[in-house]
Image (tube, rainbow, N blue to C red):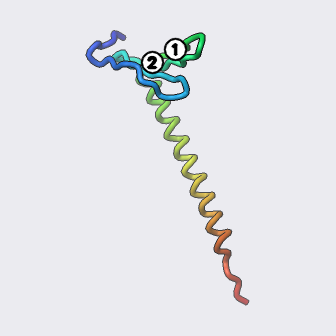
């Protein structure tokens, strides 16, 4: 697919040696090491899948956080026994 020059964006450092750029269609991810560059292009559909994957991870992490918090509350406030 042809790139649209008006939508191009400059490289942006994301962290950990990863840079992102946009050519009007693909989002390019570069892993820049000391001796080489590894580059991949994400089409819009692939980016959508990556975003969904990140959302799924967030949901899992949130569920784990809630379960741990509930467990800690239960440890601090054990049910009282009446007898």
Which residue is painted at 65% across and 71% down in the image?
Answer: 76
Asked if residue 80 lies left or right of residue 30, the reply is right
Q: Are marks 1 and 2 in contact (CB under 8 Å)?
A: yes
Residue lying at the far front of the rendered structure: 34
Among the 4 quarters of the image, the one containing residue 47: top left
x, y percentage for residue 26? 41, 18
Residue 21, percent across and down?
41, 19
The residue labelled by disc 1 is 39
Question: What is the spatial separation of the Cα atoms under label 1 and label 2, in whole angstroms?
Answer: 7 Å
Q: Secondary structure at mark 2?
A: strand
Residue topped by disc 2: 28
**Residue placed at 54% from the left, 19% from the top?**
31
**Residue positioned 48% across, 35% down in the render:** 52
Classify 10 Å Cα crowding around label 1: few (below 14), some (14-19), many (20 and above).
Answer: few
Decide: is 60 above or below 39.
Answer: below
Image vertical order of residue 47 relative to residue 75, above or below: above
């Amino acid at each position: 697919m042809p790139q649209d020059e008006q939508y191009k964006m400059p490289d942006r450092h994301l962290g950990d040696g990863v840079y992102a750029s946009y050519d009007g269609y693909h989002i390019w991810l570069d892993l820049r090491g000391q001796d080489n560059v590894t580059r991949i292009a994400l089409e819009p559909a692939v980016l959508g899948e990556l975003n969904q994957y990140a959302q799924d991870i967030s949901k899992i992490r949130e569920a784990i956080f809630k379960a741990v918090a509930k467990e800690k509350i239960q440890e601090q406030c054990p049910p009282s026994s009446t007898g």
